[in-house]
């Protein structure tokens, strides 16, 4: 149980394009999902907290107009990186919180912007 | 000072050894403590979840929390090469939608 999926697992895009990453909780409902970014050999950096049916809460320094988050249902949250640039290249990981307030992580999405 | 301190390693041990991983923290509001294992280029996998002080055992893994010392540990018995990964401690004050505060992660290598 407690499986979280992410799609795509890897994406390469041209600078200036937008990329959408999906995060799904497969066997439980998640009122809250989180989006993280991880640089090589570094810990996870929280970008935003996503609550179903309401606007996401962004961490300080994270541009909400650049990283659009939609939590349309209790099992799906999406992160859209708009007008991507090479500095947005990173490993993006989502997590979903179950009713016991335990976070389960997705396998991550590796984004490379050329 | 970081809220959560964790030695980044790398920590190298022979197969079969007992591994001890530790984190210290400064925020006394933390009540929920977790250990995650992360393989290279993968998402973190929840290993242990404990509430408040005490011990919890699951197979070869034992988690200990000492809130009075603000110190948590993860012990791995009979370590295997497949245990080679980065181990992240995480903690929160609790409550729905509560943010996790992570340690930097300890890189562990179990050698044959």
Image (tube, rainbow, N blue to C red):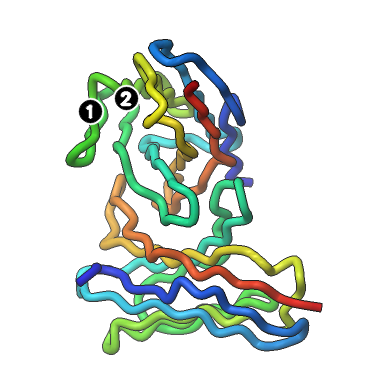
Q: Chain of mark 2?
A: A
Q: Chain of mark 1?
A: A
**Residue sitting at 60 percent across and 47 percent down?**
B42
> On the image, which quarter does residue B37 sit in?
bottom right
From the image, tell me which residue sits under label 2: A67
- A78 is higher (above) or lower (below) than B106: above
Q: Whole-percent x and y of residue B59?
A: 69, 75
User: Is residue A63 visible from the viewing direction of this image?
Assistant: yes
Q: Position of A11 compared to B94: left or right?
A: right
* Measured Cα–Cα span from mark 1 to mark 2: 6 Å
Residue at 38% x, 65% y is B103
* Crowdedness near tag 1: few (<14), some (14–19) or many (≥20) residues, C-alpha within 10 Å: few
Secondary structure of the residue carrying tag 1 is loop
Q: What residue does disc 1 label?
A: A63
* Residue pictured at 55% horizontal, 68% vertical: B107
Residue B93 spot, x, y in % from top left: 26, 62
Looking at this rendering, what residue extends furthest in the top direction? A17
Question: Of helix, strand and loop, which one carries label 2?
Answer: strand
Q: Is residue B67 depicted above or below B101 in this figure?
A: below
- Residues under numbered marks 1 and 2 in contact, where contact means CB atoms less than 8 Å apart: yes
Quadrant hosting residue A58? top left
Point 34% across, 27% down: residue: A52
């Amino acid at each position: 149980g407690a499986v979280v999926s992410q799609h795509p697992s890897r994406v390469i895009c041209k600078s200036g394009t937008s990329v959408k990453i999906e995060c799904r909780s497969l066997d439980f409902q998640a009122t809250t999902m989180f989006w993280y970014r991880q640089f090589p050999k570094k810990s996870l950096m929280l970008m935003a907290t996503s609550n179903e049916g309401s606007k996401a809460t962004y961490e300080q320094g994270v541009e909400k107009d650049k990283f659009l988050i939609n939590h349309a249902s209790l099992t799906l949250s999406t992160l859209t990186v708009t007008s991507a640039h090479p500095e947005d290249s990173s490993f993006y990981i989502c997590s979903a919180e179950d009713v016991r307030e335990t976070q389960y992580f997705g396998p991550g999405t590796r984004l490379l912007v050329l | 000072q970081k809220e959560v301190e964790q030695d980044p390693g790398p920590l190298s041990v022979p197969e079969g050894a007992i591994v001890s991983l530790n984190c210290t923290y400064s925020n006394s509001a933390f009540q929920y403590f977790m250990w995650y294992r992360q393989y290279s280029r993968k998402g973190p996998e929840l290993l242990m979840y404990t509430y408040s002080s005490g011990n919890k055992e699951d197979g070869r893994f034992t988690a200990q929390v000492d809130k009075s010392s603000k110190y948590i540990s993860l012990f791995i018995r009979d370590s295997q090469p497949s245990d080679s990964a980065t181990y992240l401690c995480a903690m929160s004050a609790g409550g729905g939608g509560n943010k996790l505060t992570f340690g930097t992660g300890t890189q562990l290598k179990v050698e044959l």
